[in-house]
Image (cartoon, helix red, strand yellow):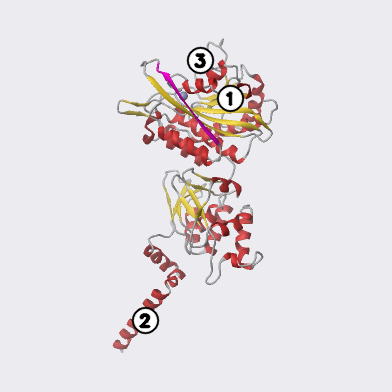
């Protein structure tokens, strides 16, 4: 009897072995074998995890499988504070039914999705990404699409009104993605290959949402202020230049650079700098320009010490980059020149060069917005500088700021006769514009203990304050863009 059982056992193992060998897809039928099957292919099933204390961003990596719905529900029930799913590396799904159900859970709970720096998401992962209420992609991240195939037929073999297409079309409709996105994915690449979406396609198919993305804003500030960027000292800020230029190009802006040289008054040394500018043409008044600028340089290294300049002025630079993304999705009526100025710390050299060699006729430059240190303030106070000279913008700002109950919007630092406050009309990149008679508004907080210190680091950012300031700026810009003339 024992012998028979052993033989039966062996026979069963052999049979299963042959079955798996001949039809490896059998392994994908059960959740407990899916893990093993994926590992055999060198991938892993989707796992969820946290990287920050606040647990508001839930990270995800791996292939969506039969347990993903349960796993996701469990983690969201345990952590209702999750606002964003950060999809680090999600190559696809091996259970489409479960994938669409899990994705609907995300949308129903109003969770945002984000693909972080160097992240990539493809195939079924892309479907899940589209479930985010607010969706953003880091400029270095990728999103892949392709067609699907059954046992014998491929998607495009079926007529357009075939049942096989309906579950996908219904899903995209629910997610407010145009149905043409679905037909595009079928043509983009066959099922066994992948097409990485271009920035133009990402825009075209409404894959990312046009609202400001806090993830992308905070992430950009963090990258610019990281040690790898070595404090972005003029002459040693190539990494920052590349990031800004790639960001503008990725958004489809017309990009130009302005190289210039100057003599550093403090050292007498000849130095060179580089402004990076990206332009979006206005839909109604294309020959009227608004310059939206910030200096991206900081103090670099002093000896072995890195001055990261997270607030001064990775914060303003990231705001320019994020606003460029916003307006590339929401084309403005007036043309906007997004400008990242170099060599501000050494004497406003980048903005001086810009006004001397403007990329368009000087009389077409109608307004300049400047951001310099906007990510932290213990009093939640932000100064708007320039309404003393240009009072017509003040009521607009007063009206908009009523919605910002967490932010104190103050006016000042622009009256040369006000002895109580430093005069800021000449102390940042607004200075050269002011000297040329071009109206400007500068957004800046008052100095803090870490100003021009190596401790001006990313951990001192006040995220809620920073987001509010950038939202205030975005709304102000949208409102001013509707004026004619500016
Ligand atoms: Zn500054």
Q: Which residue is mark 3?
A: 422
State which quadrant residue 41 falls in: bottom left
Q: Is residue 82 visible?
A: no
The residue lying at 40 percent from left, 18 percent from top is 264
Ligand 1 closer than 8 Å to the CB at disc 2? no
Give the mark toward the camera: 1 or 2: 1
- Please state the extent of the stretch shown in magenta in the rendering: 254-264
State which quadrant residue 40 falls in: bottom left
- Mark pair 1, 2: CA separation: 77 Å
Dominant SS in magenta: strand
- Mark pair 3, 1: CA separation: 21 Å
- The residue most toward the bottom is 1
Ligand 1 closer than 8 Å to the CB at disc 3? no
Residue 463: give x, y in percent of width and height: 49, 35
Residue 339 is marked as none
Count the marks.
Answer: 3
Q: Is residue 322 magenta?
A: no
Q: Which residue is mark 2?
A: 12
Residue situated in front as seen by the camera: 466 or 237: 237
Q: Earlier in the sequence, mark 3 or mark 2?
A: 2
**Drawn side of residue 206 relative to residue 457, left or right:** right
């Amino acid at each position: 009897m024992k012998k028979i059982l052993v033989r039966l056992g062996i026979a069963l193992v052999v049979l299963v072995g042959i079955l798996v060998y001949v039809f490896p897809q059998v392994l994908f039928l059960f959740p407990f074998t899916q893990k093993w099957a994926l590992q055999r292919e060198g991938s892993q099933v989707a796992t969820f995890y946290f990287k920050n204390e606040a647990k508001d961003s839930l990270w995800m990596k791996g292939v969506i499988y039969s347990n993903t719905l349960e796993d996701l529900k469990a983690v969201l029930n345990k952590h209702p504070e999750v606002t964003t799913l950060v999809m680090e590396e999600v190559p696809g799904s091996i259970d489409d039914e479960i994938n669409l159900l899990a994705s609907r859970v995300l949308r129903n709970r109003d969770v945002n999705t984000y693909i972080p720096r160097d992240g990539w998401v493809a195939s079924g992962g892309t479907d899940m990404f589209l479930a985010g209420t607010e969706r953003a992609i880091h400029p270095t991240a990728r999103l892949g699409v392709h067609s699907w195939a059954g046992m014998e037929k491929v998607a495009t073999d079926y007529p357009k009104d075939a049942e096989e297409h309906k579950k996908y079309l219904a899903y995209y409709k629910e997610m407010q993605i145009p149905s043409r996105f679905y037909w595009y994915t079928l043509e983009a690449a066959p099922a066994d290959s992948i097409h990485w979406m271009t920035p133009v396609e990402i825009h075209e198919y409404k894959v990312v949402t046009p609202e400001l993305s806090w993830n992308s804003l905070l992430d950009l500030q963090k990258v610019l202020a990281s040690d790898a960027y070595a404090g972005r000292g003029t002459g040693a800020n190539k990494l920052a230049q590349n990031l800004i230029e790639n960001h503008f190009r990725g958004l489809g802006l017309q990009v130009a650079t302005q190289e210039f040289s100057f003599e550093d008054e403090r050292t007498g040394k000849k130095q060179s700098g580089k402004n990076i500018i990206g332009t979006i043409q206005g839909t109604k008044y294309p020959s009227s320009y608004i310059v939206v600028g910030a200096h991206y340089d900081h103090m670099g290294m002093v000896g072995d010490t890195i001055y990261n300049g997270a607030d001064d002025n990775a914060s303003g630079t990231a705001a320019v980059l994020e606003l460029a993304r916003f307006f590339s999705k929401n084309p403005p009526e007036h043309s906007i020149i997004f400008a990242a100025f170099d060599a501000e710390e050494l004497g406003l050299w980048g903005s001086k060069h810009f006004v001397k060699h403007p990329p368009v006729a000087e009389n077409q430059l109608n307004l300049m917005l400047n951001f310099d240190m906007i990510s932290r303030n213990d009093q939640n106070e932000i100064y708007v500088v320039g309404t003393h000279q240009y009072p017509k913008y003040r009521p607009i700002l007063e009206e908009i700021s009523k919605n910002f109950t967490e932010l104190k919007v103050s006016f000042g630092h622009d009256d040369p006769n006000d002895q109580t406050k430093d005069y800021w009309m000449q102390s940042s990149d607004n200075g050269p514009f002011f000297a040329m008679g071009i109206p400007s508004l500068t957004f800046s907080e008052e100095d803090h203990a870490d100003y021009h210190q190596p401790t001006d680091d990313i951990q001192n950012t006040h995220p809620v304050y920073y987001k509010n300031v950038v939202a205030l700026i975005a709304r102000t810009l949208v409102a001013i863009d509707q004026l004619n003339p500016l």
